[in-house]
Every structure is written in C-alpha cells, then in structure tokens.
Image (cartoon, rainbow, N blue to C red):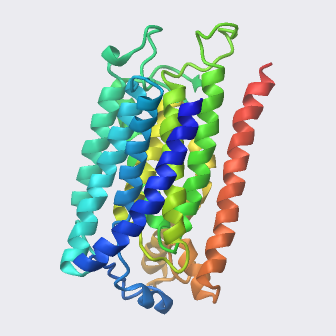
Amino acid sequence: MRAILFSGAIALVLSLVGTRFAIRQFVRMGYGQPIREDGPTTHFTKRGTPTMGGVVIVISAVIAYFASSLIEHAKPSASALLLIFLFVGMGLVGFLDDFLKVRRQHNLGLRSRAKMIGQTVIAVAFGVMALLPGLADDRGVRPAAFYISTIHNFGPKLWMPLVLIVIWLWVTGFSNAVNITDGLDGLATGASIMVFAAYTLVEIWQNNQRCGRVGIDPNHCYSVRDPLDLAIVAAAITGACFGFLWWNASPAKIIMGDTGSLALGGGLAGLAILSRTELLLVILGGLFVIITLSVIIQVSYFKFSRRVWGQPRRLFRMTPLHHHFEMLGWEQITVTIRFWLIAGIFAAVGMGIFYGAWVAKN
C-alpha cells in the first residue's frame, strides 16, 4: 500500500515542478494555443497560452509508477504495463495533433480520420495484448476479460472480435470525451482527478477482496489480475493531475492540449477494462458522458431540423455543454466549479454503486 502513496506523491511533485519548467520552455519555443474563431469571445485572451502540458502529466505519472515500484522492490505487472502503454500511446496521438496545431498556428491539427486511425491502432493493440493467454497469471486470469462488466463479469462469454470492438469503443469514446470536456481552464483536469481517485479506491478494494487471497470467499471476490498495481498507476495519474492543476486552474498558465486529454481518457478506459468495470465508468465519468452527449444531440437535432423543416435549429446555444452556459452569461470559473461538483457527484454515486453491490451480496 505504501507504493500507492509514493506513486501519488512523486507524481504530484514532478508535475508541479515540471509544469513550471514546461511553461518557460513552451513560451520560449512559441508553442501557444490557437483558439477557435467561432468560440466564446472571452477565450480570445487565451490565444498564445502554452499548450501540450499533457506531456508533463504523462511523463510524471509514468516516472512515479516505476519509481514507486523500484522503492518497493516490486516487479511491474502485466496489467500496469498495458495501462501505461494505452496511456502513453493515446498521449502520443494527442501530441502529434497538438504539434501540428502549434506549427500551423491553427486550431485544426490532425484530420479527424487520421486521429481516429491512431486511436484505433493503439486501442486494438492494447485489446489484443490484454486478451493474450500468455499474460494470464497463475490463476489463469488475463488482464482483460471476454465479458461485459459493471462490477463483475456477467452474461455469456463474448467472441474475441466483439470484445475488441467493445474495447475500441470504450478507448476511443472516453479519450474523445475527455478531449471534448477540455474547453475551460481546469475543467477536464479537475474532473479527471475525481475519477482517477475513485478508481484508486476501487482498485484498493478489489485488491483486498481479490480471488485467491487467503480468507476471501471464492464465490464472492474480484477476478482482476493486478488490482494493486492498477491502483498505483491510478494514484500516479491522480497526483500528476493535481500538480498540473496548480498551473492549469483559471487563469490557466498552460493548457494540457490533446496530449493530456486523450491520454487521460485512454487511461480511464484502460482502468475500466482491466478492472472489469466498463459500465461503471459511465457513472464514474458521468460528466464526460453528458458533455459528449450534448455534442451528439446538438449535431443530430441540427441535421434533423434542417431535413424536416428546411431550417436548421439548435437546442443549445453552443456545444460542448460548458460553452452553452458561457453563452448564457456564466463566468468561466463558475461553470468550471459547478461542473466539478457534478463530476464529484457522479464519482460518489459510482463508488456507492460499487460498494453497495458488494454489500448486497454479503
């Protein structure tokens, strides 16, 4: 358990100090954030703010995990390495997108198709490796399962291609959801802290109640390969986000960019898949889901109204949802704090469902 504390603390310090260094370097190199012209006018003041801050989050979390493992003389597990692969891989896709934006000084980086191809390659590679029988532990438990899960596996065993489709959907869906949410100073960072912190607790509980542990009922346990190591990685990402939020809070001195948002979303999806809680993530990360749905609803209604009435209409003044409230006159900091509260409520409800399901079976 000490490794969890070490991991979180090391990541926090590295991110806090590293972000300050990154701000100076990115300013010197001219890596400023382009701003969309059709967005709220209050955002124009952010033009030129250093971006790609997600690089610090990714590096800090990865170093913290391996440092804590070294301190505790523990060998990195297959699950943790897979999660780091997904976390870093999605961050690299985002980094390429950010780099093209700052190089062209335009808010469009990778084409949507190219970005999706990159996300798909990383997601499928992660899924294939997580399902390999060679990565099963001595109990025969693989990093990922052939089932859909909320708290435990349920339903029939799925065909591998179908499992890969589900993994692809979760990884691309949540990486893009966090990316869409990253539109206000500190919004995505603060919301991510709550969800990763919740997953740290989930993994600690799963480790204490894991199948095969002495004194644990084999009919009432969690069949997860490496829950403790997953908790260490989750704590590292939580700490890295805490350190970054010091500089990312309004008024932001640096923006995480797609590097951070895609990495964080991929990390959440990876934790859900490896901990057998795919559907629970929809609750724990409810804020990301709602904001993404606002975009889907807006686009769908716009196309529907144009086809039916010949005149396109909008349900929201602007999407993603946080921009709608800005257009209503809310201050950015007000939107951010209230959305943080919503994210906290979702995380608490998700934790309640997780713990309640365990209690109900006792």
Query: Which sits in the foreground, 219 or 228?
Result: 228
Residue 90, image x, y percentages: 33, 50
Residue lying at 57% horizontally and 80% vertically, measured from the top left: 324
Query: Which sits in the foreground, 144 or 199?
Result: 199
Can the viewer see residue 293?
A: no
Residue 60, image x, y percentages: 40, 51
What is the total number of numbered labels drawn onto the structure image? 0
| Quadrant holding the N terminus | top right
Q: Where is 158 relative to 296, above or below?
A: above
Q: Quadrant of residue 142?
A: top left
Residue 163, image x, y percentages: 39, 30
Q: Where is 230 relative to 266, above or below?
A: above
Residue lying at 34% horizontally and 15% vertically, measured from the top left: 133
- Relative to 271, is 358 on the left or the right? right
Residue lying at 61% horizontally and 72% vertically, measured from the top left: 336
Q: Quadrant of residue 124?
A: top left
Can the viewer see residue 136?
A: yes
Residue 69, image x, y percentages: 43, 30
Residue lying at 23% horizontally and 66% vertically, measured from the top left: 110
